Image (cartoon, grey):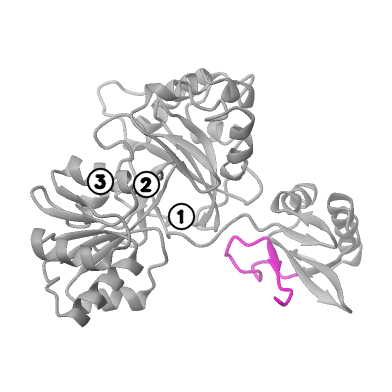
Amino acid sequence: MPHDENQPLTPEAALLARLPAALDAALQAPAYAAHLAGIDPAAVTDRAALARLPVLRKGEMPGRQREALPFGGFVPGAAGEFARLFTSPGPIFEPQRAGDDPWGGAPALAAAGFEAGEVVLNTFGYHLTPGGFIFDTAARALGCAVIPAGPGNTEQQLDLIEAYRPAGYVGTPDFLKVLLDAGAKAGRDVSSLVKALVSGAAFPPSLQAEFRERGIAAAQAYATADVGFIAYETPGQPGLRVSDGLILEIVRPGTGDPVPEGEVGEIVVTVLDLDRPLIRYALGDLTAALPGQEDGARIRGWMGRADQAAKVKGMFVRPEQVAEIARRHAELGRLRLVVTRANEADAMTLRAEAGTTDAALAEAVSETLRAVTKLRGTVELVAPGSLPNDGKVIADERPVG
């Protein structure tokens, strides 16, 4: 149905309306032109059409970039057209996006209670990697003054806190605890710190409670060097709110197929930046959508890694292969390939949800397992809904050491 021009677009519709232009921009980059060959950008205007496009996996990017330095042919412009150039672990080479808040972090800081005119202590690194600049530009776009402290140098950071009296902290939760503990031990005044936005490390409930007891309201954000802010906490709401300006999908690991709402899967993002577009970029992180949210899409937060490859009898078994077994047997539900040791040798058991325990089905799935992985394994048919909803399709349960 065509859109009524007298009615404003919903945020979702406005986001999807920008897809064709982002695809056009991506096709100007030679590697994207090959990756998306045959795609008609004008026809990609909804999530179903987007889901038919191939994913580009972050894990592939270091190899792709080595073949065509620096960006692997996935950036429309030349390196000299960008303001800053970075490298992040992999290595992955990344340009800084355009704009005052190029990684989209100001809304996350505002949601965490940061306000214009406040001083912010930024302990993310500024050297080669973009972390420091991601949070620096976000705070400055909000109107805050930033102390570019970077990580480490605890004594000097305590000096800075006493001199500049920052109200806010950005960095990992671990380093905030280091600063608070060091300040308490040395009798330093760190009482100005009353709010924090943390990222880059686990933030368990016990540490959240400790910060509250010490008078600090700490929120968390999910961000990556290549994408920027993906989702962030908002007061009184469950999970993390997906950032404006990007399309987030949750797919079955090893595929590009969206999972049913609420099921754990791999995060795939599409960034609608015409200078640095990312089209169905699979990050390798797991999450699940929170259904029924009124203020925009929400996810449960980071729930582990999707890249679950395991080496069995000298050969890698990957989530894509488990997904291929599922494709060939539509009568199956969730699958989990469990790798163990038996009689001093690797062993595989494919646990598959099915509405029957028919031996013929188990044998057929076993043959498919052998054909796809080139390895022998047993098949165990289990009741529908009995496998955990945690996104894990390969479980390596071999003892370590």
Look at the image and tell me whether residue 2 can be seen. no
Quarter of the rendering occupied by the C terminus: bottom right
Q: How far apart in space, not on screen, are marks 1 and 3 (Cα)?
A: 29 Å
Q: Earlier in the sequence, mark 2 or mark 1?
A: 2
Which residues are the magenta region? 382-401
What residue type is disc 3 on? Answer: Asp
The amino acid type found where label 1 is placed reads Ala
290 above or below 175?
above
Closer to viewer: mark 3 or mark 2: 2
> Which-is-in-front pick, marks 1 and 3?
3
Q: Examine the structure image and report whether residue 11 is included in the region drawn in magenta.
A: no
Which residue is found at the position 26% from the left and 37% from the top?
Answer: 101
Image quadrant holding the N terminus, namely top left
Category of crowding for the residue at label 2, using alpha-carbon neighbours closer than 10 angstroms: few (below 14), some (14–19), many (at least 20):
few
Residue 158 image offset from top left, x and y in percent: 18, 67
For disc 3, the marked residue is 136
How far separated are the C-alphas under marks 2 and 1?
34 Å
Q: Are marks 3 and 2 in contact (CB under 8 Å)?
A: no
Residue 280: give x, y in percent of width and height.
53, 37
Residue 278 versus residue 375 in the image, above or below = above
Q: Which mark is residue 127?
A: 2
Is residue 270 shown left or right of residue 313?
left
Which of the 4 image quadrants contains residue 256? top right
Residue bearing mark 1: 289
Residue count near mark 1 (Cα–Cα under 10 Å), binned few <14, some 14–19, many ≥20: many
